[in-house]
């Protein structure tokens, strides 16, 4: 029998996670030029429909269905066949199987939306639609199975990922980096500056992400219990600490903290704690959040400038790097006494096995996401035009791709 309290908690958490994708749309849209506002929002919004339909049809089954070689699930749960009111003996024993499946659906919605931050301002919407579809099938579902599925290959190594460090953040961040390199730089990139057009919109998006992340991490306990409360505390503490340290970094480097920096800092703090929220002690969330901001800021400013890749909204610098640090930190600070799903304690407590498993899982995730994204983008580039023309890019993708304008009275001053 399912537990009504746990069921209500997970359904609410699923709704929390859902609101993160519209929140991400605002977060990203505020950082782009006015002429690309609606296209950026649409790049996240359409995934709420596409990913949800694919998840019920085949996504859940490929992620959590019968194990096939440790890399992918079978089609036994296709169209939610057998996913009903009773709990799953494998994944969640106190909530309906359907509740677990829909909670996981919301993860599959937001993850590909994260990639869009790397590609904004120059990718054809039709090409993005096809890319996201293929990416879900070829990257997200296999990784979800390898990390969280019964018999998954990465899980069998002893690596742990509480709420999506590998599956969500590293996969999307690495894929965003590879895809933006293949897509090419924005017009005038490196020769003129790109400024956010609406920072209050960025803050609104960041606030919705912070709010939704409580469902993201606390809900991953899959019960309304102490572990959920623990994940709630570590999540909030890491986000708060990262926001403060980002502000400190800006004060030291640039003499003034910025609102955009504070919003970015809290998000990277959320990213970093995600894989270990239900494994690491509360005190370690101060360290995880405190260090992620200088690490990500270094990659977003120095490394990005050094190599010249146009990761437009820093999906790689935020989610890829933040997720990698979070996975490593889980190997440093994880404790079996907090969550028995971890077979060993972290390196900080004298064990090496968990730390090694975390490093191996990160390397596998990076390699798999990068290779598959490279294949998808290369094939798409050969069979269709994936990028708008220079004229369309100059006009703005709101008009050229959607025949709409976020600000109809806008006179075109940010060309």
Image (spheres, grey):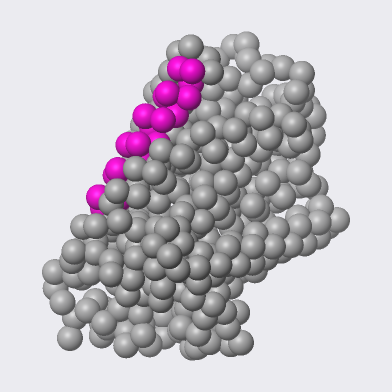
Q: Quadrant of the C terminus?
A: top right
Image coordinates for residue 133, horizontal then vertical, percent: 61, 61
Q: Residue at x 64, y 48 (%)?
A: 176
2 displayed left or right of 90: left
Q: Give the quadrant of residue 202.
A: top left
Q: Answer above or below: position of 107 versus 390.
A: below
Dominant SS type (magenta): helix
Q: Answer above or below: position of 322 versus 411.
A: below
Image coordinates for residue 203, horizontal then vertical, percent: 38, 29
Magenta region: 232-252
Q: Give the quadrant of residue 34.
A: top right
Q: Which of the pair 32/269 is nearer the observer?
A: 269
Q: Residue at x 15, y 77 (%)?
A: 3
Q: Residue at x 78, y 47 (%)?
A: 182
Q: Which of the pair 287/213 is nearer the observer?
A: 287
Is 60 within the magenta?
no
């Amino acid at each position: 029998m399912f537990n009504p309290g746990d069921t209500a908690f997970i359904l609410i958490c699923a709704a929390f996670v859902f609101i993160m994708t519209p929140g991400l749309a605002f977060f990203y849209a505020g950082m782009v030029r006015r002429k690309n506002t609606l296209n950026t929002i649409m790049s996240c919004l359409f995934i709420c429909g596409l990913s949800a339909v694919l998840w019920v049809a085949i996504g859940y089954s490929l992620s959590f269905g019968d194990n096939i070689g440790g890399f992918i699930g079978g089609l036994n749960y296709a169209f939610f066949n057998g996913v009903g009111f009773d709990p799953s003996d494998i994944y969640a024993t106190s909530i309906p199987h359907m509740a677990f499946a829909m909670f996981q659906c919301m993860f599959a919605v937001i993850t590909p939306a994260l990639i869009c931050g790397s590609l904004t301002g120059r990718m054809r919407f039709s090409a993005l639609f096809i890319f996201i579809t293929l990416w879900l099938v070829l990257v997200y579902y296999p990784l979800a199975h390898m990390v969280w599925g019964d018999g998954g290959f990465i899980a069998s190594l002893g690596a742990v990922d509480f709420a999506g460090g590998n599956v969500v953040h590293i996969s999307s961040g690495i894929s965003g980096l590879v895809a933006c390199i293949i897509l090419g730089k924005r017009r005038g990139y490196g020769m003129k500056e790109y400024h956010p057009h609406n920072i209050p919109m960025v803050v609104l998006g960041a606030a919705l992400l912070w709010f939704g992340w409580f469902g993201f991490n606390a809900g991953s306990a899959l019960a309304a219990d102490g572990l959920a409360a623990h994940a709630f505390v570590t999540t909030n503490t890491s986000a708060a600490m990262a926001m403060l340290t980002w502000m400190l970094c800006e004060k030291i480097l640039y003499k003034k903290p910025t609102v955009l920096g504070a919003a970015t800092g809290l998000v990277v703090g959320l990213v970093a704690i995600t894989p270990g929220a239900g494994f690491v002690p509360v005190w370690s969330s101060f360290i995880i959040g405190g260090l992620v901001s200088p690490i990500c800021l270094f990659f977003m400013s120095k490394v990005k400038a050094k190599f010249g890749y146009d990761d437009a909204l820093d999906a790689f610098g935020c989610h890829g790097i933040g997720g990698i640090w979070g996975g490593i930190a889980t190997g440093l600070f994880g404790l079996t006494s907090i969550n028995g799903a971890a077979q060993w304690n972290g390196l900080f407590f004298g064990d090496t096995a968990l730390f090694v498993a975390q490093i191996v899982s990160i390397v596998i995730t990076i390699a798999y996401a990068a290779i598959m994204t490279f294949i998808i983008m290369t094939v798409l580039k050969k069979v269709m035009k994936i990028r708008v023309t220079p004229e369309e890019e100059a006009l703005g993708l709101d008009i050229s791709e959607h025949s709409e304008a976020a600000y109809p009275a806008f006179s075109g001053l940010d060309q």
